[in-house]
Amino acid sequence: MKKYLSEENKLKITIRKDYFERENIKAKILSNINRLTHLCLDEKTEHTKNEPQKRVPSNENLENDPSFEVEKRPKLNEDEKTVTRNKRLLQSFLFDHLKKAKDALEDEKTNKTIIMQQAQNKRVEAKLLEEKKKIEKNEIFDIEKKTIVLIDDIKILEENIKKNEGKFMKMSLINHYDKMKNFISTNTSPTIFWCPLKFNEKMKTLQTGTHEFINKKIQEIESANYEVEFEEENWLKEFDNLREIIKRKSLENEEGKEEENEEGKEEENEEDNEEETEEES
């Protein structure tokens, strides 16, 4: 009897520890899944979120209203001298403005320092973006790897809990029925155990029948399966979906790198051709 009780207490403590450890691991897995979800967000969706909404002009509804009419500006009667003078001023202003804009564009194109600075800025931005993607890729790989290990750990714990719960249930029932051997069982359902004040031959016969009933019950308990079953968690499906997204994005990144390399080669060839034409001219 004492042996059963001591084993029961040990199993109770072990089961509680396993359940507590399972909850801790589950919390870590959920934290990893949240981080993976954040890292796997599509850049396009992020850009659309950051983009400010276009303002609708206040007069748009008025223009669609058939009763709304824009008041026309009255024409001014000007003489021919004023008209020709205004035309001359406008032409000279436009000519000066276009000339300045053209000169500014030519200066910007011909200025090598500006061109080199712009190219350098683009290269720096590309390198920073590439470095950021590498860091995120390594983080995703690390989180995915750790989460797989945690899922394996939680499955091992669940198996241990199932076995220990089954053992504990069997021990508890066997211990319960073992105590009832000193009593006499009734044939009613549920079974009632009672103990007479004095035992006579008839009572002893009934007690022997109770012993047989209890031994049969203990055999049924030992052959029965009392293991608990854990339901499949939703986060497990979510993690599988994230892994599929990670695989797809890695393939897309590889294809994008190949396209960038091809475009880079084409740009280099174009730059070489431009330099050759400049030298010839």
Image (cartoon, rainbow, N blue to C red):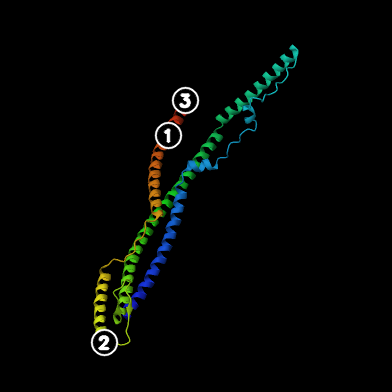
- Total residue callouts: 3
Q: Residue at label 3?
A: 277
For badge 3, the amino acid type reads Thr
Q: Residue at label 2?
A: 200
Residue 27's place in the image compared with 169, above or below, is: above
Camera-nearest residue between 66 and 215? 215
N-term-proximal mark, 1 vs 2: 2
For badge 1, the amino acid type reads Glu
- Circle 2 Cα neighbour tier, 10 Å, few/some/many (<14 / 14–19 / ≥20): few
Q: Are marks 3 and 2 in contact (CB under 8 Å)?
A: no
In the picture, measured across the screen, residue 167 lies left or right of residue 253, that is left
Percent x, y for residue 229?
34, 61
Q: Residue at label 1?
A: 263
Discs 3/2, front: 2
Give SS at disc 2. Answer: loop
Q: Are marks 1 and 2 in contact (CB under 8 Å)?
A: no
Camera-nearest residue between 184 and 235? 184
